[in-house]
Image (cartoon, rainbow, N blue to C red):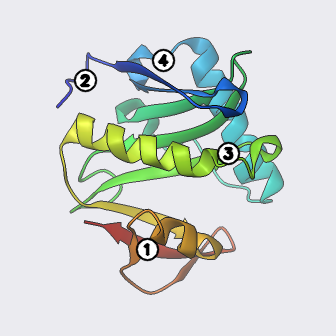
Amino acid sequence: MRKKNEYLFLPHYFDFMNLCFTCKHFDHLSLKELYDSMVLRQEIFVVEQNCAFLDADGKDQIAYHCFGYDTDRQLHAYTRLLDKGIAYPEYASIGRVVTSAASRGGGWGRKLMEYSIEQLYATFGQQAIKIGAQAYLEKFYGSLGFVQCGEGYLEDGIPHIPMLRN
């Protein structure tokens, strides 16, 4: 397992636009990475999904952040990794899963989640992962080994379901 003062820069290149994934603790983010992640999250979660909420929830500073950049250093994909006890008392979590509108349909969401699961295990150890998935993505997350583990709920007016990967 990694320590907080370590970050993993294992570039993973993929055929579509040479996307490269990296994962870093908040303390090691560059200003560009922090800014890019906040812009992408706001573009999708606040503007596209029309949800007025405070995205900066105080968990970013204790999280690891996974980025998918192209060769022009444009951010296309992002997740936030949280250790057990932060988002859920008994589980680690992957949250703020987002791909840019321009990059959808190219398989980046799957690669992002596969990378994020790998990084969560490398960072916090092999353990169960719980997510709050938008309900329409149940099949997608199911294909990654997640199963629904509770009743659906509304979050910011969007149907969600809790899902668990053991």
Closer to the chain start, of discs 4 and 2, is 2
Residue, disc 2: 4
What's the CA distance linking mark 3 and mark 1?
20 Å
Q: Given the image, on which type of amino acid does mark 2 rest?
A: Lys
* Secondary structure of the residue carrying numbered label 2: loop
Name the quadrant containing residue 88. Answer: bottom left
Identify the residue at image location x=26%, y=16%. 5
What's the CA distance linking mark 2 and mark 3?
26 Å
Depth check, front residue: 86 or 132: 132
* Secondary structure of the residue carrying numbered label 4: loop
Closer to the chain start, of discs 2 and 1, is 2
Tell me where residue 89 appears, x and y as whole percent.
Answer: 24, 61
Q: Are marks 3 and 1 in contact (CB under 8 Å)?
A: no
The image's mark for residue 29 is 4
Q: Are marks 4 and 2 in contact (CB under 8 Å)?
A: no
Residue, disc 3: 99
Depth check, front residue: 123 or 19: 19
Q: Given the image, on which type of amino acid does mark 3 rest?
A: Thr
Q: Given the image, on which type of amino acid does mark 4 rest?
A: Leu
